[in-house]
Amino acid sequence: MSRYSQLCPVHFGSGEIKNLGTIAKESEMTHVLLVTESAIIQTGIPKKAAASLEEAGIQVEIYDGVQMDAPDTTVVEGAEMAKRAGADGIIGCGGGSSLDTAKAIGLYVTNMDTVDIKKMIHFDPQNPLSLKPALKTISVPTTSGTGSESTIVAVITDTDTHQKCGCIAPACAAVVDPDLTVGLGPGITAYTGMDAFSHCNECLCNTMPNPHSDTLALNSIERIYRWLPIAVKEPDRKDARYELAIASNFAGIAFQDSSVNVGHALAHALGAKLHIPHGIGCALATPAVIELVAGARPEIYGKIAEIFELEISSVEELPVKLADAVRSFNRSVGIPSLKELGFTREQVLATVSYAMNEMMRMACIVPQDEKVLTNMMAQTYDKYQ
C-alpha cells in the first residue's frame, strides 16, 4: 500500500518573491518575523521580501541570527523576538538552516512558556509532547538543496550534545523563486545540489517507497545531472537555476512522502563530529549508499544508470559502476574529499558510533550493523581522494 500527498502549496516561478505579501495576507498574517542570516541580508533578498510584505500592509521585524546547522539557541532567540513583537506569522528566507530555524521558531513561540527547547527538538514518536499549534510559517528558499519548504520536520542542533534533532513543524506555504539563486557561488551551488540528489537517492532505497516519490526523485536526479554542472560553471544561467529549483523542491516533496535514511545518518555523523557542511556530507555518503542498495532495487537504479549514460550488463555490476559514476560527478562539480578537508581516516571512522545511533538509518531497505556502517564510512574516505 502507498500513501502520498503534498504538504503545502508551492508558489513557484521567476519573480514570485514579489507576491510574498499577498500570500502572507491570504494566510491572515498581519505582523511577521522574517528569519534569515546576516550573509543573506547582504544579498538584498530579505529587503525584497520585506518590501512585498509591507506593500501588503504587513508589519515586519527581522531576525538575522541564523547560523549553520540551526542551533537550538537561535530558535530561542528568534522565538523571544517574535513574542516581544507580537508576531502572528513567521517567514523563513535563506538556505536550509534559515528555513528550519524559522519553522522551529513558529512552533516554539507558541509553546515556550510550557516546554523546554531541548524537549521540543528531541521528537519522540513513542511519547509525543502535547503542543499548541505553531504560528503559520512561509518558507522562501534562496538555495536549491534542502527542500525544507516542503517537509514536515525542522532539523535543529542540540548545542549541548551537538546532536541533530527534529521537531514536527511544517510550513503553511512556500515561495520558490529561482531568481533568488542566480549568482550563487560554485561551492554552495554544488553542495546544495548534491544534498537534493541525496534526498532523491534515499527516497528510492526507503523501506516504503511509493510511485509518487519514485517519479519525483528520478525526475529530480535527471535535472540535477544535466543542470548542476552548468550552474556551477555559469552561476548566472537562469535556465539552470530554474531547473535546479524544481529539482530541489521535487526532492523535498519526495522524501516527505517516504524518508531519508542511512546516507543522512552518515552525513549527520560527519556534520556533528567533524563540522562538515551538510551538503558535502550527503554528497560524499551517497555513493556508499548506492553500493549498498542498488542491487535491492535494480529496476530503479538501472534508470539512474541510464540517466548517467552507463552501460550496465548485469545486476551484479550495477552498484559499483553507478557509485563510481556518482563519485566522478561529485568531483566534476567540485565536492572536496575528506582528506582535502584535512581529516584523517581515523577521524572519519570515529564518527560511526554517532551514525549507529541515528534511527533514521533503519528506514533503508538494506539493514546495517556497525560493520556495514564502518565499511560505508571507510568508502567515503578511501574511494574518493
Image: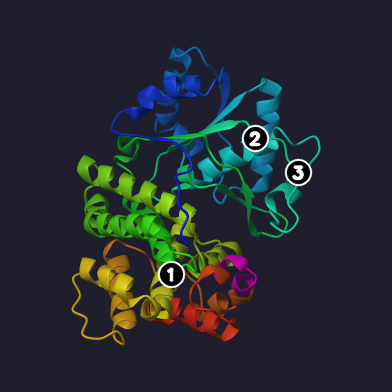
The amino acid beneath tag 2 is: Ala
Q: CA distance from mark 1 to mark 3?
A: 33 Å
Q: Is residue 380 magenta?
A: no
Position of residue 384 relative to residue 85, above or below, is below
Q: CA distance from mark 1 to mark 2?
A: 32 Å
Question: Closer to the N terminus: mark 1 or mark 3?
Answer: 3
What's drawn in magenta, residue-wise?
Answer: 354-361
Image quadrant for the C terminus? Answer: bottom left
Would you name the residue on which mark 3 appears? 130
Q: Is residue 194 in sight in this rendering?
A: no
Would you name the residue on which mark 2 appears? 134
Please report contact status of discs 1 and 3: CB closer than 8 Å, yes or no.
no
The amino acid beneath tag 3 is: Ser
Would you name the residue on which mark 1 appears? 205
Q: Please rate how many residues cluster around mark 1, counting C-alpha atoms within 10 Å: few if below 14, some from 14 to 19, many from 20.
A: many
- Position of residue 199 in the picture relative to residue 313 (left or right): right
Q: Secondary structure at mark 1?
A: loop
Position of residue 25 relative to residue 93, above or below, is above
How far across and how far down the image is residue 337, in percent?
Answer: 40, 70
Q: Please rate how many residues cluster around mark 2, counting C-alpha atoms within 10 Å: few if below 14, some from 14 to 19, many from 20.
A: many
The amino acid beneath tag 1 is: Cys
